[in-house]
Image (cartoon, rainbow, N blue to C red):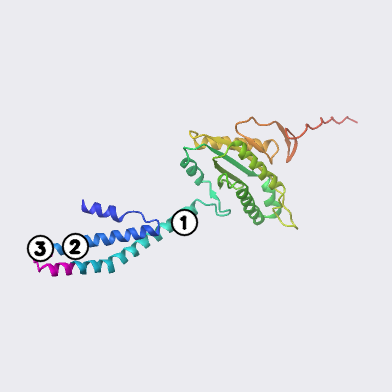
């Protein structure tokens, strides 16, 4: 019983400097109780008078203050250091090594943690990024990804947490925002991408971004919400790129030949092509 009480007192988590002081006080209090109990037993066995009793208590109190409390501070500080190291390692395990954003593994965890709230999943994907690596090399491609992540964080960071969920794909877990508001900010981001040189003056790199948005009510499972946002993103890719599609709306019809948009709902219909006459 007493062992369980001691374990409960000494196994309290130490997550701050205040916790260190509280832990040291617990150590000192436990030592004080044990020392006073031992002293009381000795006095019962051989009582030497009240003067000796008070003197023994005073010595015990001083020893506890001089020895037990500093030892408790040391042990508590050690626990705090271990906690900080563990937290740092955990965060590094949930962070993308290139961009510093949170990674794909942390997205379902954060999604489930906010299960009581209405959320939005915004999927963003760089268009034709493969050509960047092919023409300029992977080192330049990494710089482009870092710059792209920074732009996304600047434009959409107020919506919620941003993740790098694939090589060229980013996801925003947004809360407290409507679809209309989110779509407006994403459109501003797309416009900024179109006007940004991701390379250098000598080697300019143009890049566009496509997006899909899906609502995620409190009861919606993560897999279902992510699949809906992914389908909306795919619609944006298939109907012209550099645009936003909503999972709640039907995909806009369009024709894409190769990498060029021949027609979409954002543009007037292309004229019909006449068949070439035979000679």
Q: CA distance from mark 1 to mark 2?
A: 42 Å
Label drawn at residue 250 = none
Q: Residue at x 60, y 49 (%)?
A: 153
Q: Is residue 279 above or below residue 85?
A: above
**Mark closest to the chain's N terminus, 2 or 3:** 2
Q: Are marks 1 and 3 in contact (CB under 8 Å)?
A: no
Label drawn at residue 88 = 1
Q: Determine whether the residue tagged by mark 1 lies in a helix, strand or loop.
A: helix
Residue extending farthest left = 46
Residue extending farthest front = 51
**Secondary structure, magenta segment, majority class:** helix
Q: Determine whether the residue tagged by mark 3 lies in a helix, strand or loop.
A: helix
Q: Nearer the viewer, mark 1 or mark 3?
A: 3
Label drawn at residue 36 = 2
Q: CA distance from mark 2 to mark 3?
A: 12 Å
Task: State which quadrant residue 239 falls in.
Answer: top right
Q: Determine whether the residue tagged by mark 2 lies in a helix, strand or loop.
A: helix
User: Which residue is identified by label 3?
Assistant: 44
Tell me the magenta residue range.
41-56
Residue 258: give x, y in percent of width and height. 73, 39
Residue 60: give x, y in percent of width and height. 21, 67
Q: Residue at x 34, y 64 (%)?
A: 73
């Amino acid at each position: 019983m007493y062992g369980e009480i001691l374990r409960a007192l000494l196994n309290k988590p130490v997550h701050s400097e205040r916790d260190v002081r509280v832990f040291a006080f617990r150590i000192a209090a436990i030592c004080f109780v044990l020392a006073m109990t031992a002293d009381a037993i000795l006095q019962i066995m051989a009582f030497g008078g009240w003067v000796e009793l008070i003197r023994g208590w005073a010595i015990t109190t001083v020893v506890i203050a001089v020895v037990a409390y500093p030892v408790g501070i040391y042990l508590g500080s050690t626990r705090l250091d271990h906690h900080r190291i563990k937290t740092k390692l955990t965060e590094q395990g949930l962070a993308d090594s290139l961009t510093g954003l949170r990674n794909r593994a942390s997205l379902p965890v954060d999604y489930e943690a906010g299960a009581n709230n209405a959320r939005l999943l915004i999927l963003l994907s760089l268009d034709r990024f493969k050509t960047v690596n092919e023409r300029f090399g992977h080192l330049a491609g990494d710089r482009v990804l870092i710059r792209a992540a920074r732009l996304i964080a600047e434009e959409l960071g107020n919506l919620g947490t941003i993740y790098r969920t694939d090589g060229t794909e980013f996801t925003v877990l947004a809360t407290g925002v409507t679809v209309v508001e989110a779509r407006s900010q994403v459109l501003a981001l797309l416009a900024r991408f179109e006007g940004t040189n991701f390379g250098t003056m000598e080697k300019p790199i143009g890049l566009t971004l496509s997006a899909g948005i899906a609502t995620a009510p409190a009861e919606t499972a993560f897999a279902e919400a992510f699949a809906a946002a992914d389908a909306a993103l795919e619609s944006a890719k298939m109907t012209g790129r550099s645009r936003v599609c909503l999972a709640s709306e039907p995909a806009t019809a369009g024709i894409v030949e190769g990498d060029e948009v021949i027609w979409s709902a954002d543009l007037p219909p292309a004229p019909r092509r006449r068949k070439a006459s035979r000679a």
